[in-house]
Amino acid sequence: MKITTTVSETRSLIRQWKKEGMTIGLVPTMGFLHEGHASLIKKCREENDKVVVSVFVNPTQFGENEDLEAYPRDFHRDMALCEEMGADLVFHPEPEEMYQDACTFINITDLSDNLCGKTRPTHFKGVCTVVGKLFNIVTPDNAYFGQKDAQQLAIIKKMVMDLNFDVRIVGCPIIREEDGLAKSSRNTYLNERERTAALCLSKAVKRGQEVIAKGCNSNDVLQEMNEIIEKEPLAKVDYISIVDALTLQPVEYVERPVLAAMAVYIGRTRLIDNFIYGEEPADQ
Ligand code: AMP
């Protein structure tokens, strides 16, 4: 497995592989890898000749008072996992290599206005910009994203269509802990009490899935989900919404594929979870 830190050495490796007729898959990550990331790398390994994993804590997707400095990092452990999962290349640039004195950004309207975009108004501009740059550097045939970040996945798909990026976007299902908590690098912030409290997110997802299957309108589903979160004293809802799975606009009645998504503070840690209803699940 190779490790690169500069755009130019990454490009020359990729150029060589393309000359040899290899297909390239990309898994963008911010590191501190867990089984959720591993599932993306595994899928990427199955579908491509060469597997590229990027490990980059992208400063432009963090807001001013967010956890950029505190974000967990463990590059050596990440490398071991990438190696074990069969990655061919890990691209691990410094922020200066990616941005230097950049003043060009990709800004997506509409889809970034609600859900996480309300509390994190500059987040998706940073995400789209870094993913667009990674697409230009790695020129992957396929790129892998988790359904865990459902709004991000919908936004990346739209960006690829709008800007004619020549890449297939593959959505991968949410990987959970045995007790249901969606795996996340940020789970490491939780103390023991908070870790138990955090189960209210996956419980609300489960309840939502049961209720929505009975054909209720959105408000009834949201109420049931809210009740579960409200019972947990350490939890504070940022948002719980049911939106059209493609446009991310709120829907009153569940008639077409919808995304039920939430962000909840457990103590000071903001966690997200979601489910899609009425659509084929993401590739297994
Ligand atoms: P991150 O390192 O948090 O930026 O995540 C990198 C990629 O891994 C994103 O596409 C995430 O959606 C995906 N991911 C993170 N956690 C999970 C999970 N629990 N299940 C599936 N995919 C995940």
Image: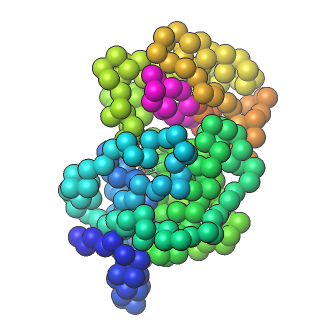
Q: Please give the name of the residue rendered at 62% of the width and 49% of the height, measured from the top-left corner.
A: 122
Q: Nearer the viewer, residue 90 or 66?
A: 66
Asked if residue 164 can be seen in this view, the reply is yes
Furthest residue in direction right, as rendered: 252
Q: Residue at x 37, y 75 (%)?
A: 6
Residue 124 in the image: state x and y as whole percent. 61, 52
Instruction: Give the answer, above or below, for where 58 lies relative to 5.
Output: above
Q: Quadrant of residue 46?
A: bottom left
Q: Is residue 11 above or below residue 183?
A: below
The color scheme shown is rainbow
Is 6 in front, or is 168? 6
Decide: is 92 above or below 138. above
Q: Is residue 51 visible?
A: no
Segment colored magenta: 263-275
At horizontal 58% and vertical 63% (from top left) the residue drawn is 129
Numbered label tally: 0
